[in-house]
Amino acid sequence: MKHRTRKALGKLACGAVLALLAGAAMAQSASADGEIRKLDAAASRVVIKHGEWKGMNMGAMTMAFKVRSASLLDGLKVADKVRFSIEKEGADFVVTAISPVTQASPLVLAATHISGDKK
Ligand SMILES: [Cu+2]
């Protein structure tokens, strides 16, 4: 009887560890801002220059990503500033979402407005 109880507990603990590992794997996604350096829709790849990325433990670099679907690259072009999300799949970083970031920041818009008022 005692043996049985211990075995059951062992199984339970093992399940809990697996759940924790699964949770850690799912947490391997992040988003960042970058600039498109290269587009290859046919190969579902994109090369993005990104700044320091603390969440992913990376310094500033230019790196290649797979994209989940080539259609994610529709309407994008080299030199576009983008915000993108990635997920780690094995050894690959896969882009799951990517969209252009508008060039004019609120600060620039404010400056334009002030100079406009002076006229
Ligand atoms: Cu990187």
Image (cartoon, rainbow, N blue to C red):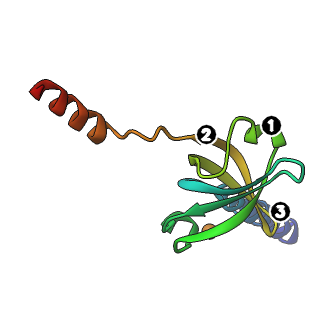
Q: Is residue 110 left or right of residue 11?
A: left
* Residue 14: percent from left, percent from top: 79, 66
Distance between mark 3 and mark 1 Cα atoms? 49 Å
Residue plotted at (51% across, 41% down)? 101
Which element type, helix, strand or loop, lies under badge 2?
strand
- In the picture, the quarter occupied by the C terminus is top left
Marks 2, 3: nearer the viewer? 2
Residue type at tag 2: Ser
**Image quarter of residue 77:** top right
Above or below: residue 92 compared with residue 96: below
Q: Give the residue number, with chain letter if any, for mark 2.
A: 99
Q: Give the residue number, with chain letter if any, for mark 1.
A: 71
Which element type, helix, strand or loop, lies under badge 1?
helix
Q: Is residue 67 left or right of residue 36?
A: right
Residue plotted at (16% across, 32% down)? 114
Dot placed on the residue nearer the N-terminal end, 2 or 1: 1
Q: Give the residue number, with chain letter if any, for mark 3.
A: 8
Look at the numbered disc 2 and say if its residue's Cβ is closer than 8 Å to ligand 1.
no
* Residue 95: percent from left, percent from top: 72, 51
**Image quarter of residue 8:** bottom right
Task: Report the front residue among 45 and 53.
Answer: 45
Which element type, helix, strand or loop, lies under badge 3?
helix
Task: Report the front residue among 39 and 87.
Answer: 39
Look at the numbered disc 1 and say if its residue's Cβ is closer than 8 Å to ligand 1.
no
Residue type at tag 1: Ser
